[in-house]
């Protein structure tokens, strides 16, 4: 049985795609082991896959002394990784981004073990850029991934999504008299959307507000104020919460989604087939959310709004045009669905097969 190490960490945003890929490879009959840091291990849910915890931390955003300390931590992680791989003898190591993938993938390359990386954004992440020159290939979520070194093979496989989202694939577009607007923000994006977006919504005519449902994710401290603001404005119905555990159902019921442009968010919109107004998080590393959103917008799946250029009056006018033009929204919904990749794990299985079976590239 071929042995594969999957390594990533740092955030749940990296761990979930890694686990989705791992699950597919496990079902294909491979022996899978996770290598991650303590923080990454805290997000782990696939308990049937053994986990090796190594030392890792981010170098970016630190003082000079902080960076020196981080390099020592990563160095110790590299030592742990090389001893583990000498003991485990993997046939392939897959990095799924994040600083915790650096030690294991780099040491695999040092030991001449084949490596590949998966990049979830439309701009190759910093860890993956460091590893890219010596990988067999890069599996990408987007059709066009920026900052890939020349000569490196790329193959688009898509971004994994939750099983609950997959169950809603190609849900028919809702055509009801009441228009359902879903606003997602997440922990980093909710403040701007809670403070600026209502200005555009309150500018809508009374007749539209009276036939509009607003469901918005907001920071806990903003929930009560937003709920009252929308109710006083005469919207048909409003639900403002800091967290929704029924997001697949909300996506399926929505006519339009407004939110940030993280790769997981866009992948979920594509699976369900919903159009979006994307407002990229301006502080995302290498401005990757802008590139994610640009590719979706240029594919006709939605509309890009740059935060620094945000104009409440202009957005209100555009929202009114869309709400009164259901065919345009349905066309964007079809374009969104055309970007879906529901079979990421199977594509990864097909991608690694030649590497594990004699490809000497």
Image: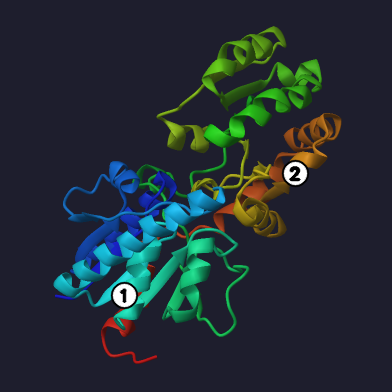
Of the 4 image quadrants, the one containing the C terminus is bottom left
From the viewer's side, name the closer residue of 269 and 223: 223
Residue 266 in picture, x, y percent from top left: 55, 49
Is residue 352 placed above or below 320 in the rendered structure? below
What residue did someone put label 2 on?
305
- On the question of residue 346 being in view, the answer is no
Q: Is residue 289 left or right of residue 313?
A: left
Is residue 173 placed above or below 127 in the rendered structure? above
What residue did someone put label 1 on?
108
C-alpha distance separating marks 2 and 1: 41 Å
Is residue 9 placed above or below 228 in the rendered structure? below
Residue 203 in picture, x, y percent from top left: 81, 21
- The residue at the point 59 percent across, 61 percent down is 122
- Where disc 2 sits, the SS reads loop
Residue 78 in picture, x, y percent from top left: 32, 65
- Where disc 1 sits, the SS reads helix
């Amino acid at each position: 049985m071929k042995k594969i190490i999957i390594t990533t960490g740092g955030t749940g945003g990296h761990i979930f795609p890694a686990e989705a890929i791992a699950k597919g490879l496990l079902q294909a009959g491979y022996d899978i082991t996770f290598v991650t840091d303590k923080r990454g291990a805290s997000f782990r849910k696939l308990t049937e896959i053994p986990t090796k915890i190594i030392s890792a931390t981010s170098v970016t955003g630190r003082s000079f002394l902080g960076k020196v300390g981080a390099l020592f931590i990563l160095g110790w992680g590299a030592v742990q990784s090389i001893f583990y791989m000498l003991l485990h003898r993997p046939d392939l190591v897959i990095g799924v981004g994040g600083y915790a993938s650096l030690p294991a993938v780099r040491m695999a390359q040092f030991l001449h073990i084949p490596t590949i990386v998966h990049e979830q954004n439309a701009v190759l992440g910093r860890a993956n850029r460091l590893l890219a020159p010596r990988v067999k290939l890069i599996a990408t979520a987007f059709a066009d991934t920026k900052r890939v070194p020349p000569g490196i093979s790329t193959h688009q496989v898509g971004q994994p999504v939750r099983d609950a989202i997959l169950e809603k694939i190609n849900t028919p577009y809702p055509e009801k008299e009441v228009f359902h607007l879903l606003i997602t923000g997440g922990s980093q994006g909710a403040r701007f959307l809670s403070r600026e977006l209502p200005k555009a919504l309150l500018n809508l005519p009374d007749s539209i507000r009276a036939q509009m449902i607003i469901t918005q994710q907001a920071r806990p401290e903003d929930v009560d104020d937003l709920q009252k603001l929308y109710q006083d404005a005469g919207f048909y119905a409003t639900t403002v919460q800091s967290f929704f555990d029924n997001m697949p159902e909300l996506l399926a019921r929505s006519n339009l989604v407004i939110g940030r442009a993280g790769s997981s968010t866009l992948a979920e919109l594509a699976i369900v087939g919903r159009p979006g107004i994307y407002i990229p998080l301006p502080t995302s590393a290498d401005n990757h959310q802008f590139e994610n959103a640009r590719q979706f917008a240029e594919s006709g799946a939605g509309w890009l709004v740059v935060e620094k250029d945000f104009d409440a009056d202009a957005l209100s006018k555009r929202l009114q045009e869309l709400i009164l033009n259901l065919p345009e929204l349905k066309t964007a919904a079809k374009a969104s669905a055309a970007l879906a990749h529901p079979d990421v794990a199977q594509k990864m299985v097909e991608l690694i097969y030649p590497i594990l079976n004699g490809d000497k590239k």
